[in-house]
Every structure is written in structure tokens, then in C-alpha cells.
Image: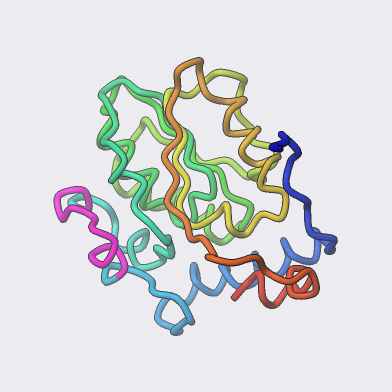
Amino acid sequence: MTTNQAPSVPELDRDALRRAIQAEYRVVAEAPEHGFHFHTGRPLARLLGYDAQWLEGIPETAIESFAGTGNPFSLGELAAGSRVVDVGCGAGIDSLIAAKMVGPTGRVVGVDMTPAMLAKARRAGQEAGLANVSFRAGFGEALPVLDGWADVVISNGVLNLMPDKAAALAEMARVLKPGGRLQIGDILVEKAVPGGARRKIDLWTG
């Protein structure tokens, strides 16, 4: 017998988790040369199959703080004129690539909760001269985007950091137009994580 019951949400202090994630990714933004337990920057982009042409014209400041886990563009390049939301945009590399793909008639909105990453993304957008991209502060579970605004929602290495994945996916669905497309690059575990481990914030952040 199958059910439509949503997966359980771990019992943990979400505010504390968000603060821990913000602290970690502030370092990725401000000191990308620091060295982390995950890959970053241009070597990571190559590892994930990013086309070198996508990175042309993208400021190195955005590339150096790239910390994704997949390649959302491997699921399909974006059509000219499309509206795109990038959930957890970080320093803006995927948002800027998307802005180049959709062209001047398209629009891209990057959303992130880490102030240092948003500041870096905004500077990179200005440096790249891309007037069709903007960056907003917000959480994946409460996107600052109108209902049905987007043709495509992209996200890279962010959903795994959200305890309530059903809520996050519902938000992505809310901002998508009917028939819109979701392109996520992320990580999965192959077996269930014990309840005790799911409540440890340091394991969520790495």
C-alpha cells in the first residue's frame, strides 16, 4: 500500500542551522582560497561539466566562490526570453550564466540568505554588465517571487541544506508558471540517515 504522506521533517533548531550555514558560506564568499571539505571555484565548474563558453564574461569573483554540487544546465539550456529563479544563488555564477542564456528579453532573479554571498553576486552582476539579473535576500522555503512568475527554477547544492524539502519544493512549484520547468543539481544519500544524526547541525553543514 502506498501513501502520499510527506516525509518527516527533522526536529532541529532551524534558526541555528541557518546561522551555521550563513557562517560557513560567508567564508566561501570572503575567503574562497581558504580551503574547504567540498570543491569550489573554476576546478569545480570543470568537474561538473560546465561549458567553458558559459563562463566567458562571468567575473572571476563569482566563479571563485562557486560551491555547487551539480550542473542544472545539463538538464537543458535556457531559452531566450525566459524568466528564471535561482534558489540559493550564492555568489551568482549560475544566475549570471542564466542571464546570458535568456538574453536581454529574459529576466533572472537570484535568491540567497547569506548577505556576503548576495553582496558578491550583486557586484559581479554589475561588473558583467548584465541588466537582466537581480538578487534578492530570502529563504528557499519563502521565496520573494510572485506566483507563477518563472518559466524555469534552477537550484544547485541547496535543497540538501533545507530540513523541510517538501516546503522548499512547494515554493519552487508556486513561483513556476503552469508547465514550467525545475532544474536541480544536488546530492543524495543512498540510505536513510539515523534520526539522531539528522538533528546534528554540524552534520548538515558538512
The span shown in magenta is 44-55
Q: Is residue 27 above or below residue 151?
A: below
Specify whether residue 48 is painted magenta.
yes
Res 45 quadrant in image:
bottom left
Q: Magenta stretch containing residue 77, yes or no?
A: no
Nearer to us in this view, 2 or 73: 2
Q: Quadrant of the C terminus?
A: bottom right
Number of numbered callouts drawn: 0
> Which residue reaches farthest front?
1
Q: Is residue 136 left or right of residue 34?
A: right
Compared with residue 44, is residue 5 higher up or lower down, i.e. above or below?
Answer: above
- Residue occupying the point 57% across, 69% down: 26
Query: Main SS type for the magenta part?
Result: helix
Residue 73: image location, x then y, percent: 30, 44
Residue 82 position in % (x across, y down): 35, 23
| 26, above or below 109, in the image | below
Asked whether 167 or 104 is in front, the reply is: 167
> Where is residue 92 shown, x and y percent of the image?
42, 51
Q: Which residue is found at the position 64% from the left and 33% from the top? A: 171
In percent of the image, x 59 and y 67: which residue is there?
191
Quarter of the picture containing the N terminus is: top right
